[in-house]
Amino acid sequence: MLLSSLPLSNLITEACLMPETMEPRIEDVSEAALLERIMLRKVKAAVDMYDQLLQAGTTVSTDATNDLLDLICLYGDHDPLQDDKPEVEDVEERKASESHRLGEDSLENNNAERIFNLLPERDTRAYSALIRGMVKVADVHIFNALISAATEVREKYNEKWDLIVELLKQMNEQKVKPNLLTFNAVLKALRRCGSLARAQSLHTLSEMKALGITPSLASFHHVLGIFYKTGNYLMLTEVAGRSFVPQDPDDVYFFSTAMRICLETKDLESAYRVHNLLNVGENWRLLGDSFQQSIYYGRFFNLLCMMEHIDVVLKWYNELIPSLFYPNPQGMKDLLQALDTDNRLDMIPQIWKDIRRMGHDNKSDLVEELLSLMARDRHSPEVQESFAACALDVRSLYKQGQVAKVALEWTTASMTNITTILLAAQKTKQAWDMLNIFKTKNRVPSEELIDEFLVRIKDGQQAVELVQISASFCLPSTPNLAQRVLQEFELSEEQRYGGGGQKSICIPGSYLLFIHVLVFSF
């Protein structure tokens, strides 16, 4: 039978039955030679052969590499003690000798870790072998790392938890005292243990208290991840009024996680409790980097926009922005919706100035949302005037583009809304200019917009031109528009019948009149 076809269990069994002084017989550099040295438990020779294979550019199979990892993790970087060597007389002395020999195999740069890192694909067997080897020389930091990795090497929830329990037993046997990070590693791992997580996490917290270990914010962060909605209230009650110091890298995720749950459950009361906790002592230092801060404040502000009265929202807006964070475009859309909900659209021009300062004025969806809100309803002349000034400022961005930014692209909606806002403010000339933009951009104004123009026009000549424009866009309502112009405006003979070289169309109706429609390009 070829050595490469033997599973590791058979290799170890055969190795136990062979004379331990037997020397390798395969001298060439090959995988077969590697497997022979593994079978003979020649750790150093097997590692040397593995390195030679890699140096020669030979690919070592995953099974062979895992066999080598099993061997190293069983005996360390040294060959096992041979029966023909002088025995250590005292049992305790033998244990001390073995402990010293294993202790020499530092986990930093040892062969097991080096070979593990060279694996192109690390399967469950490779992780398991490394864990078994590391446990032999582990301190509390290594045990913490192994517990964190436990969920990666087992598939079923109960198997993940069983491995964690086994590691904790190993710690107890080796008299390694667990610390805060040990329990946090357990709680973090439990988040990937399904239905086992809730009961075991509460048991873990009880163990922490029994050992006098105070949970950190990371502990509560992991518990929130396990209990989600039901855990938010309990955790906030537990941490209320307490000042925390950094103890775990995951501490910085507590506030953003708690606020996310508040947002998803629309729990404004709990959100205020989270924010009050942030302001206790120096807890604000545990908010994390600027990215984490932006996430936290963004979620808090989003919830405020959904749940609070606009006066309260604006108070928080002035307090948080821009001193603590800059909202993203979605945050500004949330604010616009809050203004709409409480009928405070008059604030839009002021908010637009902030949008420009924040650099969000090139976000088309945000800009179109702002324009649509200003165009939707009619307001007092003062408000309409401020809306018109805002709309003209927005129009300037479309017309000139922006340096170093993505330029806004005209849409039918944006042109229609700007035109409607200008008409509502009696700025007919600027609104008329927008019709030229429709033509330039090959967009067709709506019939409702043309009707809005007719309502605002006071001059017969402009009314005739409006009919001409409507005809140039081939709007189906043009005949009806022409009839309205004939009915509602005082027109000269020239305006009613047209002149030489100009085409005329007949408008059916009781008047039997003609109105000229110039066919030209703007």
Image: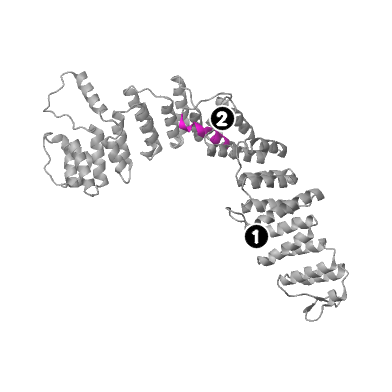
The residue nearer to you, when weighing 116 against 67, is 116
Residue 97 picture quarter:
top left
Q: How is the image coloured?
A: one colour
Residue identifier under label 2: 284
Looking at the rendering, the stretch of residues picked out in magenta corresponds to: 248-259
**Left or right of residue 362: residue 388:** right
State yes or no: residue 318 in magenta: no
Q: CA distance from mark 1 to mark 2?
A: 44 Å
Residue 70 picture quarter:
top left
Q: Which residue is at the far bottom?
A: 500
Mark 1 element type: loop
The residue nearer to you, when weighing 217 against 420, is 420
**Left or right of residue 71: residue 332:** right
Residue identifier under label 1: 411
Q: Residue at x 74, y 72 (%)?
A: 471
Label 1 or label 2, whichever comes before in sequence order: 2
**Left or right of residue 468: residue 198:** left
